Image: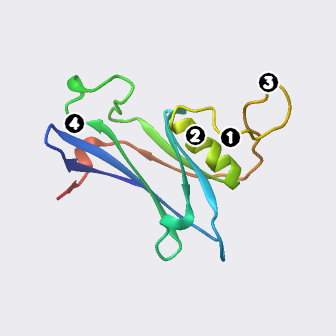
Amino acid sequence: MEFSWIRMPYDHVAVLQCQYRDLAADGIRCYWVKVYRNGKIYRWDEQDNRIAHSSICTYTTMTTRKDTDKEDDDEIIYDGDEITCTVCPVSQAMHDYLEALQNNSNGPAMFAGDHCLGYFIATSPISASVVFRPDDLPLQE
């Protein structure tokens, strides 16, 4: 798990990259990746192992701008903030549900019955943390 700066037309942006090993021998295996800022949810996404290269899956997201005065308060990561990335294996149905939520939909039905919406998850997530130090980040060209 690491940060680096990338140059964008409007500013430099800190990119977070998290890598984890996919242990699936065959078939599609799905994951829920969650990023926390100081213990509170910051970002999340769903992935599957079709993105893996040599059994390594990579989650990449743009985070805070260097010029925080031009940034939305919900996006800013400050010097000293602890960033934690958690990865949970999930079913294909859960992956599809999360993907629908990302697209502003309630998603496919996961449970039968009236007024059922939501999820149940029992898993052993993996996680890693890093303290954000903007002055120490490399610039990716």
Image depth: mark 4 or mark 1 in front: 1
Residue 139 in percent (x, y) is at 20, 54
Indicate which disc, 3 or 1, sits on the residue closer to the N terminus.
1
Image mark for residue 100: 2
Mark 1 vs mark 2, CA separation in Å: 8 Å
* Residue furthest right as drawn: 113
Helix, strand or loop for disc 2: helix
Q: Which quadrant: the N terminus?
A: bottom left
Image mark for residue 118: none
Badge 1 vs badge 2, beta-carbon distance below 8 Å = yes
Type of the residue with mark 2: Ala
Residue that appears at 36% across and 42% down = 132
Type of the residue with mark 1: Pro
Can the viewer see residue 90?
no
Mark 3 vs mark 4, CA separation in Å: 44 Å
Residue that appears at 18% across and 45% down = 8
Helix, strand or loop for disc 4: loop
Type of the residue with mark 4: Lys
Residue that appears at 52% across and 38% down = 102
Badge 2 vs badge 4, beta-carbon distance below 8 Å = no
Can the viewer see residue 96?
yes
User: Within 10 Å of the Cα at label 1, are there few (<14), some (14-19), or many (20+) other Cα atoms?
Assistant: some
